[in-house]
Amino acid sequence: MLNKMNSAIRPYRWLSAFFVLAFGIVLISSLTTTLHAQALGWEGETGVFVTPLAYTASAEGQKLHPVVAYHYFNAGSIIGDFHEASITVGIGKRFEVGYTHEFHTFGSDTNVSPLWQNGFEIFHGKANLIPEEFHKQKWVPALSVGFMARTNDRNVGNFEGMETGGMSPMAEGKNNGDIYMVASKVIPTKPFSLVLNFGVRGTNAMLWGMGGNAPDWQARAFGAVAFAFKGPGGSTIIFGSEAAQQPHHPMNFPTLNIPTTLTYCMRVVPSSKYKLNLDFGVAQLAGNVAPGVNLQARHQIGVQISYGF
């Protein structure tokens, strides 16, 4: 299969400079507490674009606060498109649980694209151990632990393993997951607020399951920084960037080297009166992963919309 991949993949480029430039010139607004209540990440957890925050999907005065979201990511002509529908429920001020289903649209390469099969299920939860500014200490960040559990993942090495074993590609896939600890801190400055986020996860998943399983569990670091300013009409717009280390290679493909994922993202909250978020991002996933192997997923566009009740 790897030989087919080497011969089938053609040079490919995404022109994303316009989007990155747009992020840089947007007026960004100051962070409000409403962002913590419905700021969902890629897999449905409260997060940035692809990495979790220490905050939970809670809302002032609500014991249960449900948030629904739709996520879209264009992973390129080889890998295809991903769509996700999620629901996350904040429980009190310290907990959240959620469910996400991932749908996959096949890429156009008949030899390589079948390595990415139909979607899988994602279950997640988070508990806030230390709230931000605990005991009125302004320097204290929010600190949380959480998990992601993915089932029926049939991508990349998972599919390859079933294929060599004589099973149908549509058979039940493998499971993988993450266990993480994350700290988040909002630093109010003028004319903007600074948001810092850092965490470590133990994972046996490649690219949050989009690349199937990793050969074993590994500790991987992630982090984010964002800037926020007040916008017109009570709106909030945040510009940020993330970095997330990945396991070195997918299961059954030891020669493929997957780089650290980088994203450049923007979150828009049109009004503090409505629990609505709009997210836009560019992600660097995987380009030349081996000599002569280009997965053409180097500058990929994603959008998300979430709404809290």
Image (tube, rainbow, N blue to C red):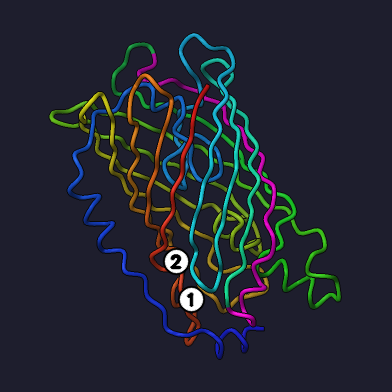
CA separation, marks 2 and 1?
A: 8 Å
Q: Position of residue 172 (x, y in %)?
A: 81, 58
Labelled pair 2, 1 in contact (Cβ < 8 Å):
yes
Does 301 lie within the magenta span?
no
Give the residue displayed 37% in from the left and 57% down from the top: 282
Relative to 87, is 19 on the left or the right?
Answer: left
Instruction: Tell me if residue 223 comes above or below residue 136 in the rendering.
Output: below
Q: Residue furthest right?
A: 166
Dot 1: what SS? strand
Amino acid type indicated by mark 1: Val
Give the residue displayed 66% in from the left and 46% down from the top: 101
Relative to 280, is 180 on the left or the right?
Answer: right
Would you call the spot at circle 1 few (<14 residues within 10 Å), some (14-19), or many (20 or more)? Answer: some
Of callouts 2 and 1, the N-terminal one: 2
Q: Looking at the rendering, which quadrant does residue 118 occupy? A: bottom right
Would you call the spot at circle 2 few (<14 residues within 10 Å), some (14-19), or many (20 or more)? Answer: some
Q: Quadrant of the N terminus?
A: bottom right
Disc 1 marks which residue? Answer: 289
Instruction: Tell me if residue 140 comes above or below residue 248 in the rendering.
Output: above
Q: Residue furthest front?
A: 233
Give the residue displayed 64% in from the left and 67% down from the top: 116
Q: Which residues are magenta?
A: 109-134
Q: Nearer the viewer, residue 295 or 307?
A: 307
Q: Position of residue 47 (x, y in %)?
A: 46, 38
Amino acid type indicated by mark 2: Pro
Q: Which label was assigned to residue 259?
A: 2
